[in-house]
Image (cartoon, helix red, strand yellow):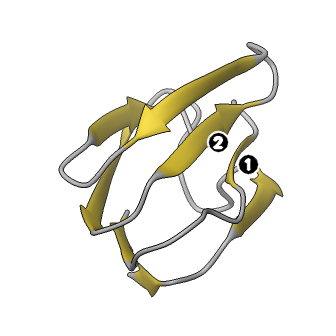
Amino acid sequence: ISVNQEAPPHPDQVSAPSLLDLVVSLGTHDAQFHISELGTIFCYQPGTMTYLAGKVLTHSVPKWGKGERIALA
């Protein structure tokens, strides 16, 4: 669980490469979810649930404007 924390670009350390990780976004923010290898930026609004091969794909959540962010991973 992380609260109001930016997530610098990183692959997950404890995941298995063959498994998908679930990341849930909660709060009142307007953040974005970046996946470096794919060159993609996704809207990461509260209530968003993302399945991701976190051990394989470098991902991040940069600083956002207003609001609170809680991430469950």
Residue 11, percent across and down?
73, 48
User: Outermost residue, bottom direction?
Assistant: 3
Q: Which residue is mark 1?
A: 11
> How crowded is the residue under tag 1: few (<14 C-alpha within 10 Å), some, or many (20+)?
some
> How crowded is the residue under tag 2: few (<14 C-alpha within 10 Å), some, or many (20+)?
some
Asked whether disc 1 touches disc 2, contact meaning CB atoms under 8 Å apart, the reply is yes
Quadrant where the C terminus is found in the figure? bottom left
State the residue at coordinates (79%, 16%): 39
Residue 27, percent across and down?
26, 71
Q: Is residue 41 left or right of residue 38?
A: left
Q: Which residue is mark 2?
A: 55
Residue 56 picture quarter: top right
Callout 1: helix, strand or loop?
loop
State the residue at coordinates (61%, 62%): 64
Residue 31, percent across and down?
51, 53
Quadrant where the N terminus is found in the figure? bottom left
Give the vertical position of 1 relative to 9 (above or below). Answer: below
Q: Mark on residue 66?
A: none
Callout 2: helix, strand or loop?
loop
